[in-house]
Image: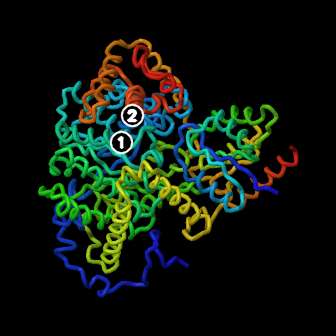
Amino acid sequence: MTSRRSLSDIAVKPFYGPEDSAALDYEKALGDPGSYPYTRGRRTRLERGGAWIQRELSGEGPPARSNAQFRYLIEKGAAGLDVIGDAPTVACLDPDNSFARNSIGTQGVSLCRLEDFRELYDGIPIDRVTLSHSLPGWFAVAGIYLVARERGVAAEVLRGSVIQTPLYAEDYCYAVHMPVELRLRLTLDSIEFCSREMPRFHSFVEDTYYVSDGGPDAVDEMALGFVEIRKVVRELVARGLDVDRFAPRIAILVNCRMGFFEEIAKIRATRRLFARMMREEFGARDPRSWSVNITAHTAGSSLTAEQPINNVVRGTTQALALALAGVQAIEISAFDEAYRTPSPESHLVGLRTQQILALETGVARVADPLGGSYYVESLTDEMERRICARIAEIETMGDAAELSARGWFRTMLENAMVQRVREIEDGTVPRVGVNVFRMSDDEDRLLRDVAETKIEPCWDHAERIREFKRTRNERPVVASLADLRAQAADDRASLMPPILAALDAGATLGEISGVLRLAYGQAYDPFGTDKPPAGLFGDAPEGMLA
Amino acid sequence: MTPERVLVAILGLDQHETGALAVSSMLRDAGMEVIYLGRFASPQTIAATALDESVDVVGVSCHSWEYVYYVDDLLRLLRERDHGIPLVLGGSVITPADGRRLREKGVAAVFGPSASADEIVRAVRDLAAQRRLAH
């Protein structure tokens, strides 16, 4: 017996007919693929022979090990790279921080200095491969920009992206221990910097994946995404930036759960909403500002520790939904997701799944093949209605940054997380191998050995960083951090130039972040162990440094 | 009898919070009091809070491997000064073999990804009752 309600709690009829999409005005609501309002996709002629950019999330150990992963993925046919930082890196801490000790390089790559970016991208054709970064946005922009400069690659040709997470990260999985004003400023400064220096680079990926995985449903996912996009766009426009300078480089990284048609409808509704918002509300004139680039990860939270091979099937099904929805890039969450960052085996299966879908099935030959389906069009309208209503509901309550500071989003996210677990626990949402068709541990062995292999923290890398800090030329480090601190105190200054200078001078992610935290009235090290380089902040109150 | 008091925390820099929040909610529904320490806890902050709050059981949600390196310190601190507060671990990264090793070390109960709410609630309630009898 299957439920008559979708995962987002939309009632589903036994079948749909002409009356369900009777009010549909083709030109107004759909348009051909490649034309306003882009419901049916961004492009008339699909790129790359009809397929999407195929990539897999990677990142493990010290930078050199991640570099080896990159080479492996490219050799196996990946057209793009997406690197995720380990827990200390995404929290803006150095690996030699004592609280970072047990998580160095285990759930992503450890990066904290310019030398790490050099090693990460060593031998990688950064002018040809698209480089996506699930890292603190400003840090990734600074790293790739400096590496390109050293290698004589013009910043204008760099392609790829960074996620920007100013409003929700602190409450949900990506806490950097900075107040919302600082997170927002770093977001705006790095986007503004890229709009001038790296015009082909997507400096604003609205990451609705992380903020919805294991939490908000598809409607709330996109409502949160739009609330954040709208806040950032308004702030950039308020700085005097022309919306068409940066809007063409906004992308949305969406989640894709098991609700097959709902996810497709969500993506179609998102393209339409974005186009109308940009043209009608923000006055964008460049059609590239109207047609949002959508990339996707298949839902890690839909994957199970039980019977891990079933996750290959889940990833395939979700990737098919994404291919039918017409996204620009896909990453399939690895079958060993519940246990670890992707093993080489799961990387290969993910890539091969995408290659089989793209090359053998022909799903990408025709743009928006589900367009006109009574059900899909009706569901697209319904998703759009619900997402709009939710955006309005949230924005009516106040400024998004204030809501964030007040903890409103935190409460919403907490409730959503609890609800997702309860749906599985009480069986409302079936999950094969978990609440239905379970197997004993003794019987459930297929792929378990791969999935259960643990990665040891890279203590030797932390030792390298300690040695680096002991032996580097300290004077330019201290001088650049002092300048960063001075610039941080000036609201009108961009933080990117002093950040670039500091990274170039040998300062680290943890040091730069610590200085910024201090400038915003927070402790240098949120866990009270790290101290800034000697000679800096002799005047800061002791308690702030401890 | 006063409600059981349970501390729920996540060790180190692991930011996966769904499990900890969901278990807290289930324990509260079962009538227990949950002291939610949340993310970024260390063995020291957990032990200190457990003592301050006079909890009956400490529960740690594990979705990274950091627990492997923290668990000995945590067990030692919870045993020190005659606290004897039982430690329960749960999470998707804990394999059946890990569970056996953890129980040998002295972890009072271990839950893998397949554990039901009922199992967790029952085990925590039993451990709290045993501890209250012993004190």
Judge from the rendering whether residue A321 lies leftward or rightward of residue A50; answer left or right. right
Q: Nearer the viewer, residue A103 or B22?
A: B22
Give the residue at mark 1. A181
**Residue found 51% across the figure and 76% down from its top:** A3
**Picture mark count:** 2
**Residue found 42% across the figure and 33% down from its top:** A521
How many angstroms separate mark 2 from mark 1 (CA)? Answer: 9 Å
Give the residue at mark 2. A520
Q: What chain is tagged by disc 2?
A: A
Number of residues whose C-alpha sits closer than 10 Å to that of mark 1, classed few (under 14), some (14–19) or many (20 or more): some
Judge from the rendering whether residue A226 lies leftward or rightward of residue B116; answer left or right. left
Q: Nearer the viewer, residue A106 or A6?
A: A6
**Residue found 71% across the figure and 61% down from its top:** B30
Quadrant into which the C terminus of chain B falls: top right
Q: What chain is tagged by disc 1?
A: A
Q: Is residue A63 visible?
A: no
- Residue A74 x, y percent position in the rendering: 33, 41
Res A26 label = none
Amino acid bearing label 1: Glu
- Residue B3 x, y percent position in the rendering: 76, 56
**Residue found 29% across the figure and 46% down from its top:** A79
Against A210, residue A280 (above or below) is: below
Q: Is residue A156 visible?
A: yes
Colouring scheme applied when the structure was drawn: rainbow
Against A474, residue A357 (above or below) is: below
Mark 2 and mark 1 in contact? Answer it, CB < 8 Å: yes
Amino acid bearing label 2: Tyr
Q: Secondary structure at mark 2?
A: loop
Q: Secondary structure at mark 1?
A: helix
